[in-house]
């Protein structure tokens, strides 16, 4: 059932391993794009703070204790098209059968292992600096309804040098330029006025301070707090007080006027953060902190192709 549609387009740009460190980096484009939008550097990652667990939560609207995806699973197994926890792509496809949908991720296991492979999702993969131009062409050519992007190089810099180090922040600044390219492409495609534009990180990471490089998977502040930012008509100019990265799923469905699944602690736990939209009909936000009990484990896997 389609409720009132708020946007014709949603672009989600994920920056792997950026955590909350965007606030410490030189990001003039991010600052400009979200100057009238909603921003938080305290969105809560999924536990453990590892890529598949976190991107899975965002795209499925359920926690890792429910979806049970890990990096090795999403790298090896296509996401089942009959899962009781369909991806955002499948939910949007069912509501809008002819819509153009795209998933463009440097770390391709997201597209392979978290998105159903048989529902007509356009996709490609390459290193961030190459992928961005492919994405911009795609936006201009197809004006996608839903576009999900993941850039991986910031996580690579964190694994190599430590998260929050000068090198990690420098790479965030460079990826800020890629964010601008994507945003500008949506402007040039003349869809930006009807687009909900989101930047989100999956997790942060540690800095051991000995030049050894960082890791993530645990539940320290540097790992678990991440950036979320939204811009578009109807988005409040606010600092979001409380949200979880899995709320991305509810936000995207809301934007497209697709009814949210029933909240269920054994399933769908994605909610619309209070204050994000100037819509008084949004349900009060529930505390789900007791659900983030999955055992932390440390990821030393540097999955960016830059490090291979
Ligand atoms: Zn990650």
Image (cartoon, rainbow, N blue to C red):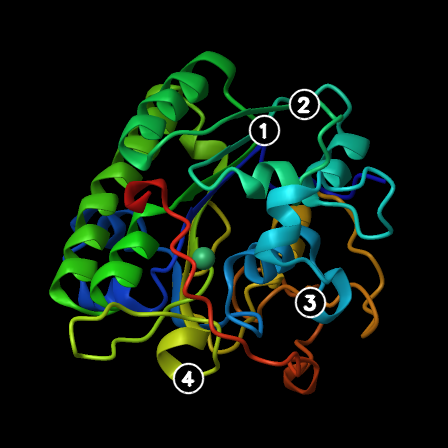
Q: CA distance from mark 1 to mark 4?
A: 36 Å
Q: Secondary structure at mark 2?
A: loop
Residue 223 placement: quadrant: bottom left
C-alpha span from label 4 to label 3:
18 Å
Label 3 to label 2, Cα distance in Å?
A: 27 Å
| Label 1 sits on residue | 145
Q: Disc 1 on helix, strand or loop?
A: loop
Position of residue 34 measured from the top left corner of the image (x, y, whole percent): 32, 53
Residue holding disc 2: 99
Whether residue 279 is visible to the viewer of this picture, yes or no, is yes
Q: Confirm or deny contact between disc 4 and disc 3 (CB under 8 A).
A: no
Name which of mark 4 and mark 3 comes first in the sequence: 3
Q: Find out whether the residues at labels 2 and 1 contact each other: C-beta distance under 8 Å.
A: yes
Distance between the alpha carbons at the discs numbered 2 and 1: 6 Å
Q: Secondary structure at mark 3?
A: loop
The tally of labels here is: 4
**Which mark sits nearer the N-terminus, 1 or 4?**
1
Q: Nearer the viewer, residue 25 or 274?
A: 25
Picture layout, residue 15 above or below residue 11: below
Which image quadrant shows ligand 1?
A: bottom left
The percent position of residue 80, horizontal first and vertical second, equals 80, 41
């Amino acid at each position: 059932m389609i409720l009132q549609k708020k946007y014709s387009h949603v672009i989600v740009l994920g920056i792997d391993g950026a955590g909350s460190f965007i606030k410490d980096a030189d990001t003039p484009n991010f600052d400009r794009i979200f100057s009238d939008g909603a921003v938080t550097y305290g969105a809560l990652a999924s536990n453990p703070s590892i890529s598949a667990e976190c991107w899975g939560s965002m795209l499925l609207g359920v926690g890792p204790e429910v979806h049970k995806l890990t990096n090795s699973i999403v790298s090896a197994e296509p996401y089942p098209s009959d899962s009781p926890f369909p991806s955002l792509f499948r939910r949007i496809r069912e509501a809008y059968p002819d819509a153009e949908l795209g998933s463009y991720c440097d770390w391709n296991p997201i597209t392979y292992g978290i998105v159903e492979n048989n529902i007509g999702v356009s996709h490609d993969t390459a290193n961030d600096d190459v992928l961005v131009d492919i994405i911009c062409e795609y936006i201009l050519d197809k004006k996608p309804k839903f576009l999900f992007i993941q850039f991986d190089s910031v996580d690579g810099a964190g694994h190599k040098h430590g998260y929050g180090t000068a090198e990690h922040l420098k790479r965030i600044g460079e990826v800020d330029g890629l964010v601008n390219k994507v945003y500008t492409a949506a402007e040039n495609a003349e869809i930006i006025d009807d687009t909900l534009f989101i930047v989100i990180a999956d997790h942060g990471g540690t800095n051991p301070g000995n030049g050894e490089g960082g890791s993530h998977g645990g539940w320290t502040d540097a790992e678990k707090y991440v950036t979320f930012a939204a811009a578009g008509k109807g988005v409040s100019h606010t600092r979001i007080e409380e949200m979880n990265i899995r709320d991305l799923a509810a936000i995207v469905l809301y934007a497209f006027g697709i009814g949210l699944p029933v909240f269920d602690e054994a399933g769908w736990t994605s909610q619309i953060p209070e204050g994000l939209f100037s819509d008084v009909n949004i349900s009060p936000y529930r505390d789900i902190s007791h659900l983030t009990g999955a055992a932390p484990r440390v990821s030393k896997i540097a999955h960016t192709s830059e490090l291979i």
